[in-house]
Image (cartoon, helix red, strand yellow):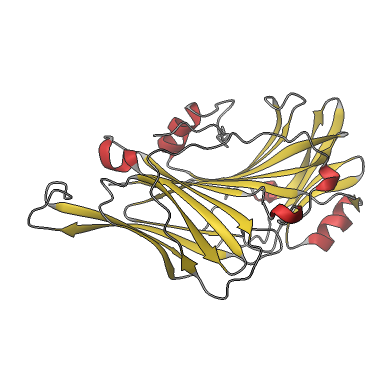
Amino acid sequence: MMQDQMGIPACFSSGERLGDDARAVTRSGQSVFMSAYRTKIADQCRLITITWCKNLLLHGLSVSVEGPEGDSHYTCKVEVKPWCFWRKQGSKRFLVDDKPVDIFWDLKAAKFNGETEPSSEYYVAVICDEEVVLLLGDLKKDAYRKTGCRPALIDPILVSRKEHVFGKKKFLTRVKFHEKGRFHNISVECKNKRHNSGSNSLNGIDLEMEIKIDGHLVLLVKHLQWKFRGNESIHLNKVRVELYWDVHDWLFSPGLRHALFIFKPSLLSSSSSSLKASSPPFSSSLTSTPLSSKTGSCDSTEGIDHGSTGSSEFSLFLFAWKVE
């Protein structure tokens, strides 16, 4: 399995980082959704990482700000327990390079709908120099009124989203491929096809994997035991999405193991009116780029379209933990 080069903080542990994070996730059985944004904070262009965790007892919210060298972080954690209602609204302060940063949140009426992160009726605001440098949720007016701060001049850019989800055969998530787009529903399903014989079968079973976006089949991988790593380009309206998968540990490693799916969108130069998939050759290996700060100015980055190249900074990393 490829090495995970983006450590994800465990919400309820003291200082664990992954590889230890993978063990922390499996121990608790908690779902983890992490979103990283680039914006200007404490006089530098930095990554702000918002992590939502959920297990049987509580929801957790963690806000982490990248340090000056890109490898250290300043972190603020919130635990939302059912019996501690005051925790569902509040604020905390911590220092980033000796500059105060305030986190305000209101989750009193947040609608989670059984998910790890809320879908509506909430806000989480990150404040620095009397500016709201990052604001999540739909209660934006409430956030500005509560904090008394003005919007920042620079809009934050969503750089990546990383999710740990658990399931038996089917794994679901919702994602925006760019900030101004709509949510898309993604499903990954592994199926067993029985055969009497054949060199492509494993113990008489041939494995298939289906990936759907908004109910449309965009990828069907037959003989998955031989094509456990690969990549494909799919088209969704005006966006081309590069899809990479590595399910080796699902098939060949004992115990609870995860597969990794990466969705990397880029803007097409010409529109595509329907959902379709192309078929480049399968790749024999899969590598990913570490998530780190760019040296360029925060001011030069807006939305998904970056000049004539049409490239996007955003990537979705989906870790699908298969429970037997």
Query: Taking 131 as reference, is 140 left or right?
Result: left
- For residue 58, say whether it is visible: no
Picture mark count: 0
Q: Quadrant of residue 78?
A: top right
Q: Quadrant of residue 220?
A: bottom left
Q: Residue furthest bottom?
A: 273
Q: Quadrant of the N terminus?
A: top left
At horizontal 83% and vertical 47% (from top left) the residue drawn is 300
- For residue 133, say whether it is visible: yes
At horizontal 67% and vertical 47% (from top left) the residue drawn is 313
Query: Taking 8 as reference, is 211 left or right?
Result: left
Tell me if residue 72 comes above or below residue 104 in the rendering. Answer: above
Residue placed most toward the observer, 24 or 278: 278
At horizontal 73% and vertical 36% (from top left) the residue drawn is 294
Where is residue 92 drawn, in percent x and y?
Answer: 77, 38
Q: Residue furthest left?
A: 196
Where is residue 58 drawn, in percent x and y?
Answer: 54, 46
Tell me if residue 199 comes above or below residue 173 in the rendering. Answer: above
Where is residue 259 drawn, in percent x and y?
Answer: 39, 43
Where is residue 76 drawn, in percent x and y?
Answer: 70, 35
Tell me if residue 268 comes above or below residue 131 in the rendering. Answer: below
